[in-house]
Image (spheres, rainbow, N blue to C red):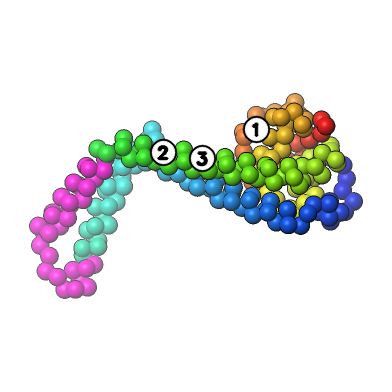
Amino acid sequence: MGKALANDSDSLSTINGNMMDLLIDQEREWLMAREKVIALQSRMLFWYGDNSNILWVLSQLISYAIGTMLLMFLSRLFDWDLTLWHYVAVFIIQTAAFVIAYTSRGRLAQRLERRIAQSDQRREQSLDRLYTLATDSILRDIHAHTPLTLLDIESRYQYRLQLASLQLILQKEVEQGRLLLNHQDFTVHLPPEFAEYELHQYAGQMIYKSML
């Protein structure tokens, strides 16, 4: 386990207040960039994944139902005298739009892949800036007080930084040989980043020790 902390405010007093604010702002930027990547990847999986054909058909059937109900509502609202041919015309237009979109799936998927790649690059750049700020602030303090668990580190800065970003910052130090993480104590392989609730169950077991 990590060292006991007598007073969390003492650790914050060693960090420049403006630097801590910059770190928090940069973390917020990284979190937003990560959420955008996750949203785009989810969209890719939904519309262009293995089961996407079924989803495309289901979405089209739903659009037929919505279009029909909308026409019925408008006809009553504006007292339109719609015939069966009006509904057939709308059905044909919807079907034509679906066929065009469906046959363009490859091009649409490539466009989405480019957006994902660009967003992921911005996420990495945001993380690099976050790590640079951490190098000039909290990492010096962490190295001076290890061994610490990830939960200790989160508590040390009064929970102003999230576990997910702290774990990635520390992982960069591990990869550079500046920190040692007790990998042997884990029964599962930790992915490069966690959602906050998933990481929390491991954070108390993740012990970091400075190699400086």
Label 3 or label 2, whichever comes before in sequence order: 2
Q: Which residue is mark 3?
A: 120
In the displayed structure, does residue 119 sit left or right of residue 98?
A: right
Mark closer to the observer (3, 1)? 3
Please tell me which residue is depicted at 82% across the width and 39% down the height of the picture: 143
What element does badge 3 sit on?
A: helix
Q: Is residue 101 magenta?
A: yes
Q: Position of residue 68 (x, y in %)?
A: 22, 58
Q: Which residues are magenta?
A: 73-102
Gap between marks 1 and 2 measured at Cα = 28 Å
Q: Position of residue 56 (x, y in %)?
A: 31, 42
Front-most of residues 170 and 81: 170
Label 3 or label 1, whichever comes before in sequence order: 3
Q: Is residue 174 visible?
A: yes
Q: Which residue is mark 2?
A: 114
| Magenta-drawn stretch, dominant element (helix, strand or loop) | helix
Number of numbered tags placed on the structure image: 3
